[in-house]
Image (cartoon, rainbow, N blue to C red):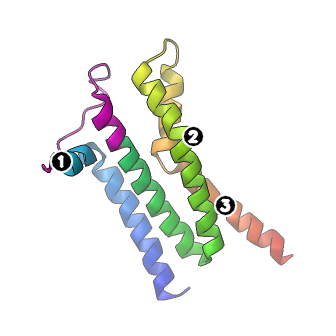
């Protein structure tokens, strides 16, 4: 393990920790479009009063932060671009398929889908898919060696 790889791991872990710690203040909409300091977000209690565009901007920003920090960890652990590239493909799949489904379900509020929204939130907004890649890559690497 080189110092550079340890740096990527430390960057990814500390980045994910900070995203989790400040998740209520990840107001990308205020920063990007209003040039203001981030506001405290309260999506859980103001479920029906959510403004669509700020909500989407903030969720996309959080998704990208989580996944990019996860990719840094993956690159740090394995040190090969092919693993980071595959993780980027997974990130784009989530960005183009899973995230729009989550956003639509959250904003449309179809009856009977609240449990699904909660579970989809965990998969999409938390770096679950990216973290599942780590044991898969270890398994693939071990299979190639034998």
Q: Is residue 46 above or below residue 34?
A: above
Tell me the residue that label 1 is attached to.
38
Residue 20 x, y percent position in the rendering = 35, 51
> Which residue, given by chain and number where applicable, does mark 3 sit on?
135
Calculate the distance from the C-alpha at mark 1 to the C-alpha at mark 2: 28 Å
Numbered range of the magenta stretch = 34-58
Task: Kindly identify the residue that appears in the image at 32 percent across and 58 percent down.
Answer: 18
Left or right: 85 as drawn, with respect to 118: right
Q: Is 132 one of the magenta-colored residues?
A: no
Can you identify the residue that label 2 sits on?
Answer: 97
Q: CA distance from mark 3 to mark 1?
A: 36 Å
Splitting the image into 4 quarters, where does residue 79 fall? bottom right
Q: Residue at x 56, y 60 (%)?
A: 88
Checking the image for residue 68, the label placed there is none
Callout 3 secondary element: helix
Which sits earlier in the primary sequence, circle 3 or circle 1?
1
């Amino acid at each position: 393990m080189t110092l550079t790889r340890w740096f990527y791991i430390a960057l990814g872990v500390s980045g994910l920790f900070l995203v989790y710690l400040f998740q209520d203040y990840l107001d990308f909409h205020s920063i990007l479009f209003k040039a203001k300091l981030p506001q405290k977000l309260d999506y859980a209690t103001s479920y029906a009063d959510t403004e669509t565009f700020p909500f989407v901007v903030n969720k996309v920003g959080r998704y990208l932060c989580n996944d990019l920090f996860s990719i840094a960890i993956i690159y740090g652990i394995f040190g090969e671009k092919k693993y980071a590239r595959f993780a980027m493909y997974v990130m784009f799949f989530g960005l183009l398929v899973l995230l729009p489904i989550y956003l639509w379900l959250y904003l449309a509020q179809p009856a009977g889908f609240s449990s699904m929204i909660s579970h989809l939130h965990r998969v999409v907004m938390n770096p679950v898919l990216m973290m599942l890649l780590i044991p898969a890559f270890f398994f693939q690497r071990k299979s190639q060696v034998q």
